[in-house]
Image (cartoon, rainbow, N blue to C red):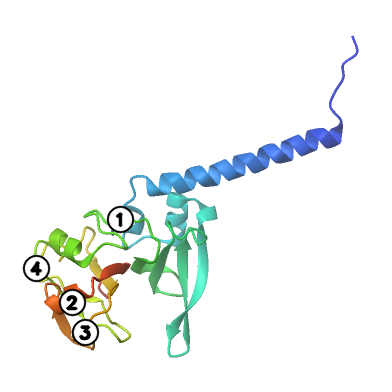
Amino acid sequence: MKRYSAHPSLAFASLALASLALAFFGLAASAQAAQQGTALDCTGPFARNSTPESIARAFGAANVTSEEINAGEGEKEKITVLFAGDPAQRLEIFWQDNEGKRSIAQIRVGAGSAWRTPQGLGVGMALADVEKINGKPFLLSGFGWEMGGTTRGWQDGKLQTQPGGCFLMLRFKPTKATKANIEGDRDIPSGNAGMRSAAPVVELIALHYPD
């Protein structure tokens, strides 16, 4: 009996499509797995002694890239980025050894991020909700300057220490206009009426290790 086989060009096209499909679903599965069960903390893949190689093993090499950013005063800094094209999953990693990329200095997420800390903190959370998680008022800087809206101290609250030995820093932004005097390089309690009138929300989360 005569056997018929597909035309070589059709077989090649089918194989190429199958490979593309496997690659696409592999990346999607890797991204989904990365977010499931992985909190924004300083343990596991984000432990201090992590490396680009160990992070690539945890999240998939295709999801780990390098970027060069402005570090201020004309300096450039190379960082490692997870899920660079997805604002919801994007995460930036800074290194103590910037050239050798050994020993994490800081990890951070910003606008549109879906990452959460073990305590449930996330970008977009209101000041009052953060205070509730901390269990008491905390200090943040006034707005209107380079470090405006960043936390200055958790006042021995529940957010004072983090798993893995790192420290938590949040940056808030006001969402309402106010006449209250809440600007400048000074400490303002989170419970301050003027600060509350600006309805601040978290715009950046950073976890950093001590030098």
Query: Relative to 11, is 32 on the left or the right?
Result: left
Q: What element carries label 4?
A: loop
Q: Residue 179 carries which label?
A: 3
Tell me which amino acid carries mark 2: Met
- Helix, strand or loop at mark 3: loop
Give the x, y percent position of residue 87.
45, 61
Residue at 18% across / 84% down in the picture? Answer: 180
User: Which badge, 2 or 4, comes first in the chain's sequence?
Assistant: 4
Quick one: label 2, few (<14), some, or many (20+) residues within 10 Å?
A: many
Q: Mark 2 points at which residue?
A: 195
Q: Which amino acid does label 3 sit on?
A: Lys
- Residue furthest right in the image: 2
Q: Can residue 207 be seen in this view?
A: no
Q: Quadrant of the N terminus?
A: top right
Image-quadrant location for residue 200: bottom left
Q: Which residue is drawn at 22% across and 88% down?
A: 185
> What whole-number distance in Å separates the C-alpha atoms at marks 1 and 3?
32 Å
Mark 1 vs 4, N-terminal side: 1
Callout in the foreground (1, 3): 3
- How far from the left and from the top, in percent, is residue 130? 19, 63
Task: Tell me residue 158's x, y (percent).
Answer: 12, 61
Q: Which residue type carries mark 1?
A: Arg
Q: Please give left or right for residue 69 compared with residue 190 in the image.
A: right
